[in-house]
Image: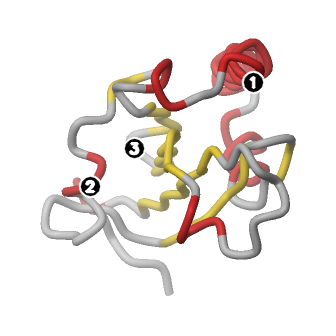
Amino acid sequence: MKAKGVGGSNLRFCTLAYIPDAKIEDPRQIGTTILLATAGEEEGLRLFVHPNLTEIVKPEDASFIEQLFEDFVQRAKDAPADLFEQLCSLSVGSLLTVDVGDLLTSSSPLTEPYSQFVPL
């Protein structure tokens, strides 16, 4: 049974981290979360990015991340459910999914670290 989130709908989330060194064994220890995706029946798919994205991403990775995020925005319009499922297990270049869950509400401990993220 899925948890009910804001507004009584099923609400899921995933976070993706930027890991400039692909050889790192545990990205949660080293990587910086730069993308938060939430998906709910009523809310749809929403994408949020770290407010200091340009300071976090190395110049040599900036173009790749920018193109990837542009693709995410377009795919969020065209096929949001498919995109969310892909984001939940993504590992491409220096971007890796690090956390997936079934509930994100104002009382969730996950909310605080991402409260400053901005819509993509």
Q: Nearer the viewer, residue 18 or 1?
A: 18
- Identify the mark nearer the N-term, 2 or 1: 1
Between disc 2 and disc 3, the foreground one is 2
Between disc 3 and disc 1, the foreground one is 1
Label 3 sits on what residue type? Glu
Q: Nearer the viewer, residue 44 or 98?
A: 98
Label 1 sits on what residue type? Asp
- Identify the mark nearer the N-term, 2 or 3: 3
Q: Is residue 98 above or below residue 6?
A: below
**Residues at marks 2 and 1, CA–CA distance in whole angstroms:** 24 Å
Residue contact between numbered discs 3 and 1, judged by CB atoms under 8 Å:
no
Residue drawn at 68 percent across, 49 percent down: 19
**Residue situated furthest left in the rendering:** 107
Label 2 sits on what residue type? Pro
Residue drawn at 56 percent across, 69 percent down: 28
Between disc 2 and disc 1, the foreground one is 1
Q: Which mark is residue 45?
A: none
**Residues at marks 3 and 1, CA–CA distance in whole angstroms:** 34 Å
Q: Which mark is residue 42?
A: 3
Residue that label 2 marks:
113
Q: Is residue 94 above or below residue 55?
A: below
Q: Residues within 10 Å of mark 3 (few under 14, many from 20)?
A: few
Hey, which quadrant is residue 72 in on the image?
top right
Hey, which quadrant is residue 22 in on the image?
bottom right
Q: Which mark is residue 61?
A: 1
